[in-house]
């Protein structure tokens, strides 16, 4: 097992390089550069950038360098001194900008994961065991509804109701007084009191598909001989379900842990923007649109790193949970 | 057309006349500072000995601002919305407009601001400004001539910081020279006449002289701090210029609002900065602000400004209609939002704010007369081709459908209320006549082919695309789609090319476009942005980018333009150095006559006004304001005298 983990770690290094290079190239592919976008953004509100200023911005950011040179300068900064570069737009070191956002993204991702599983697992098992019962039909209908409604629409509707009917504060993850406060216990409480809305919105669609997966898997396992054997040996129905079919049915859940984070960042962009969440997604989108390449590059790199770590975790968990899986 | 100028008893002509005048009046109605009041929170600080008394914080003769409606009361937090990216100018427009001079409310004359009066030499090369004595930066340090000299001579003219001097501060290729006469007098000397300097100084790009406090920013310059490179490294940036920019900012970069330590002359100072990933920006009152109301009360009235940062305009709209925003026009000011905002006026407890566009044209079509393909170039350069296309557009239908009837057919030039309005330039070829258009095209050699579409003399089908940015101007896409159907009737095939905005700019810069559209400026400020009148703006005069390069590089780059362009360039240079407004107007009118004759751009309709909202308990806000970057609304309406009633 340890050898396996070590090997996987070593493989992660070239993967990260490849991915970071690809990301860098992709970010640079659209026409124009940060300065073009900057001028275009200001022109959008009929604001004018001094022509001389534009020329000197390009010079200052080294946008004239060939792409390879820019890439190596960037990656060398990260490797040698953990310096992710300066965000063009904010004139701030990238590392100042990303960590808190990434932390909040992780909190949101984990909460959504827990909520999704907490809803999907019991319902999935129930639907499988009581196949074609009224409850099963009810949850099935609910599932399709959840899959069909786009989450940003759900977000807008909930926000509208909260703002217009109840006069609630909408958007964000904190009350105004905690927004820029340093971390404290009270701020944590405040965070969790705001977290439920985005968590529900994000959980609805993924819950729906997970319920279907769980139900199908359980239905596969339930008629198998080992279940009948266990039942014949007098194991209580609950223990029986939990101990064997459930463990095996969990397999797809565990193997998708790795995708969860990238999914949450890319899949929740619209929701995060609509709800004004201070997570990584909106900042990443902005950075991409502004061609603020060091900021965008750092996010992409981190998300990739987390994906790789996530897939390592799912492999380890699978090995632990599913007796059929061998490392050799 | 109703009179759209916000004049209060003064004719535009008279005010414009005063604009170029030699000296402005000194500030009228001065009162003793000791008589007035201050915000309760500041009074408490004074009592606790944490702040000097009001009389020591204000200039001896502070600038008196006449409140728009009534004397205000202290207190309150004003809520406004920003967007997460590149929206720093949203802050600038509200608080950061404290230049040496400022625009009046009508956008017709330059008024004293930090300079209480000035003299201009007869040849418009020398400007002597007399600063208000005793103004202090927000940290209590005096603001003097040294700061102005430092800002221009040490900062803006530092070639490592500004590889070339900002356009406003350079004439005839040479940067301005600023000297200190005494503590409160500075003299600006230009290499050649710069008659427009005062007007330029009142725009946001004219803020450099008052942007950099010497006592603070000098620590980031090698001249004053030999250890600057080490300091930069310690701060985690690669060079001292980056450190300077991140600490002292510049006129329009986000880091201007990212440093809570930088002293300013603004009514409010940064408390929670505009930084990457911020979810709001909070600004709090400047205890040393140097303006008072007519009863001597120190401004601003409002304690705090709270800019919430929304990523999404829809959530900003939600906040507006649920009454969580006090004044807003930025981002929500598109016609499509107007019904929603009008309907919810009662619920959100707000009234509407009318914006008078300073632009001239809602949608200007720029055919690329300098197209790289010779056949296309020949076609677009053919004046009768452009004229035929112009009368082939059914403007009344377009205005009804796209602009809810709120406009009128228009080509280009100053708006109808402007004294320089040119009837021919504005209205020619706006009458819809498909038959005549067809006949003109026939005569110009563009005969109809078998499929009903016309062919060029070289046998190719007449086909071109017009670039438009859908995310930026959705209305222009709708307008062009209608124009496409109109042109199809006269046998012209056009493609509405919706593209991303960086691509739009790159295509323009490379002269790779057939045609592009953009709102045409110069309606109320024809001197500040004449890009439609001749090839003036290297990115904006999209009908002939190579000619503008020739003009801006003094013939070194680009392509030599035809005589009529060169004549206009010369005339504009003459107008720019003419201090006398009547003479300047005469010169500009010649430009409009030539431009009307040449008919280079095709306009659709007069620019449509925007709007915004003001909460009903927010007073002293003019409900009609010009809408312009040069008059950066709502800043010149002086938000420091806005006040809450309850």
Image (tube, helix red, strand yellow):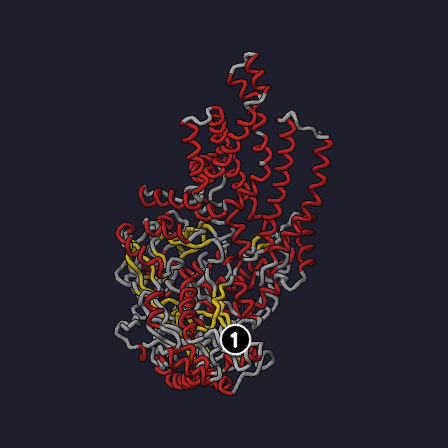
Query: Mark 1 sits on what residue?
Result: B461
Residue sitting at 49 percent across and 38 percent down? Answer: A206
Is label 1 in a helix, a strand or a loop? loop
Q: Identify the residue shown where x is 42% and y is 35%.
A: A142
Q: Quadrant of residue B532?
A: bottom left
Name the foreground residue: B25 vs B249: B249
**Quick one: which residue is furthest to the front in this view?**
B450
Q: Position of residue B75 (x, y in %)?
A: 32, 51
The percent position of residue B541, horizontal first and vertical second, equals: 49, 75
Res A194 seen here: no
Across and down, in percent, residue B72 comes to 28, 57
Residue at screen point 74% across, 32% down:
A3
* Above or below: residue B121 compared with residue A217: below
Classify residue B523 as left or right of residue A38.
left
Q: Relative to B104, is A29 on the left or the right?
A: right
- Does residue A5 appear left or right of residue B48 in this picture? right
Q: Residues within 10 Å of mark 1 (few under 14, many from 20)?
A: some
**Subunit of mark 1?**
B
């Amino acid at each position: 097992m340890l050898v396996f983990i070590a090997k996987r770690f070593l493989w992660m290094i070239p993967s990260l390089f490849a991915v970071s290079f690809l990301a860098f190239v992709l970010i640079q592919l659209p026409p124009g550069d940060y300065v073009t976008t900057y001028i275009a953004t200001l022109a959008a509100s009929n604001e004018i950038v001094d022509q001389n200023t534009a020329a000197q911005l390009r010079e200052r950011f080294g946008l004239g360098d060939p792409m390879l040179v820019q890439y190596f300068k960037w990656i060398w900064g990260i490797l040698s001194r953990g310096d992710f570069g300066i965000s063009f737009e904010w004139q701030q070191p990238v590392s100042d900008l990303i960590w808190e956002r990434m932390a909040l993204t992780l909190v949101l991702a984990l909460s959504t994961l827990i909520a999704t599983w907490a809803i999907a697992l019991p319902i999935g098992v129930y639907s499988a065991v009581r196949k074609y019962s009224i409850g099963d039909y009810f949850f099935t209908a609910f599932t399709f509804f959840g899959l069909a409604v786009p989450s940003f629409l759900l977000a807008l509707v909930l926000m509208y109701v909260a703002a217009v009917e109840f006069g609630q504060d909408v958007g964000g993850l904190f009350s105004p007084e905690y927004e820029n406060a340093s971390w404290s216990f009270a701020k944590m409480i405040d965070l969790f009191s705001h977290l439920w809305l985005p968590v529900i919105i994000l959980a609805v669609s993924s819950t729906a598909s997970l319920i279907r997966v769980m139900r199908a898997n359980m239905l596969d396992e339930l008629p198998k001989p080992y279940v009948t054997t266990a039942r014949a040996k007098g194991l209580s129905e609950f223990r029986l379900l939990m101990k064997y079919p459930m463990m095996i049915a969990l397999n797809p859940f565990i193997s998708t842990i790795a995708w969860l984070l990238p999914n949450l960042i890319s899949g929740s962009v619209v929701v995060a923007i609509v709800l004004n969440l201070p997570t990584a997604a909106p900042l990443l989108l902005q950075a991409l649109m502004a061609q603020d390449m060091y900021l965008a590059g750092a996010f992409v790199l981190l998300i990739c790193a987390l994906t790789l770590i996530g897939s390592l975790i799912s492999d380890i968990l699978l090995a632990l949970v599913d007796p059929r899986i061998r490392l050799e | 057309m109703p009179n759209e100028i916000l004049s209060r008893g003064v004719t535009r002509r008279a005010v414009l006349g005063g604009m170029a005048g030699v000296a402005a009046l000194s500030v009228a109605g001065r009162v003793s500072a000791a008589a007035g009041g201050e915000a309760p929170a500041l009074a408490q600080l004074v009592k606790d000995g944490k702040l000097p008394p009001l009389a020591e914080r204000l200039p001896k003769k502070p600038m008196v601002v006449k409140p728009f409606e009534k004397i205000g009361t202290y207190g309150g937090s004003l809520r406004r919305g920003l967007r997460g990216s590149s929206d720093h100018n949203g802050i600038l427009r509200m608080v950061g407009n404290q230049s040496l001079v400022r625009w009046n409310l009508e956008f017709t004359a330059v008024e004293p601001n930090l300079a209480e009066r000035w003299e201009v030499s007869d040849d418009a090369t020398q400007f002597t400004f007399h600063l208000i004595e005793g103004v202090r930066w927000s940290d209590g340090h005096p603001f003097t001539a040294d700061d102005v000299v430092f800002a221009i001579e040490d900062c803006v003219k530092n070639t490592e910081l500004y590889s070339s001097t900002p356009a406003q501060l350079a004439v005839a290729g040479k940067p301005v020279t600023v000297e200190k006469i005494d503590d409160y007098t500075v003299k600006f000397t230009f290499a050649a006449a710069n008659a427009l300097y005062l007007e330029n100084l009142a725009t946001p790009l004219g803020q450099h002289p008052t942007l950099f406090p010497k006592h603070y920013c000098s620590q980031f310059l090698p001249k004053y701090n030999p250890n600057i490179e080490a300091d930069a490294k310690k701060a985690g940036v690669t060079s001292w210029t980056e450190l300077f920019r991140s600490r002292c900012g510049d006129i329009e970069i986000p880091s201007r609002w990212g440093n809570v330590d930088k002293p300013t002359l603004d009514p409010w100072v940064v408390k929670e900065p505009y930084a990457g990933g911020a979810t709001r920006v909070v600004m709090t009152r400047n205890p040393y602000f140097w303006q008072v109301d007519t009863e001597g009360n120190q401004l601003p009235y409002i304690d705090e400004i709270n800019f919430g940062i929304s990523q999404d305009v829809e959530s900003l709209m939600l906040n507006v209609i649920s009454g969580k925003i006090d004044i807003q026009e930025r981002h929500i000011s598109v016609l499509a939002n107007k019904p929603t905002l009008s309907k919810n006026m009662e619920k959100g407890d707000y009234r509407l704010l009318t914006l008078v566009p300073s632009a001239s044209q809602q949608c200007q079509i720029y055919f690329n007369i300098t197209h790289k393909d010779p056949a296309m170039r020949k076609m677009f350069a053919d004046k009768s081709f452009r004229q035929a296309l112009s009368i082939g557009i059914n403007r009344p239908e377009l205005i009804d459908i796209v602009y809810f009837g709120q406009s009128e057919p228009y080509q280009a030039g100053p708006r109808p209320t402007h004294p320089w309005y040119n009837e021919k330039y504005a209205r020619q070829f706006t009458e819809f006549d498909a038959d005549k258009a067809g006949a003109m095209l026939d005569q110009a050699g563009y005969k109809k082919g078998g499929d009903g579409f016309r062919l060029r003399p070289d046998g190719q089908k007449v086909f071109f695309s017009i670039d438009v940015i859908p995310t930026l101007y959705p209305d222009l896409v709708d307008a062009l789609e209608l124009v496409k159907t109109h042109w199809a009737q006269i046998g012209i095939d056009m493609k509405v090319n919706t593209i991303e905005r960086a691509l739009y700019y790159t295509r323009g810069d490379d002269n790779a476009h057939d045609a592009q559209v953009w709102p045409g400026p110069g309606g109320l400020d024809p001197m500040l942005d004449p890009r439609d009148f001749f090839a003036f703006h290297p990115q904006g005069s999209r009908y002939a980018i190579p000619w503008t390069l020739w003009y801006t590089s003094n013939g070194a780059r680009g392509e030599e333009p035809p005589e009529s362009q060169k004549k206009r360039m010369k005339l504009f240079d003459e107008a720019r150095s003419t201090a006398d407004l009547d003479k300047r107007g005469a010169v500009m009118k010649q430009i409009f006559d030539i431009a009307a004759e040449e008919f280079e751009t095709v306009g659709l309709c007069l620019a449509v006004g925007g709007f915004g909202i003001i909460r009903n308990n927010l007073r002293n806000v003019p409900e009609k304001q010009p809408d312009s970057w040069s008059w950066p609304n709502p800043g010149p309406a002086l938000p420091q005298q806005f006040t809450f009633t309850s």
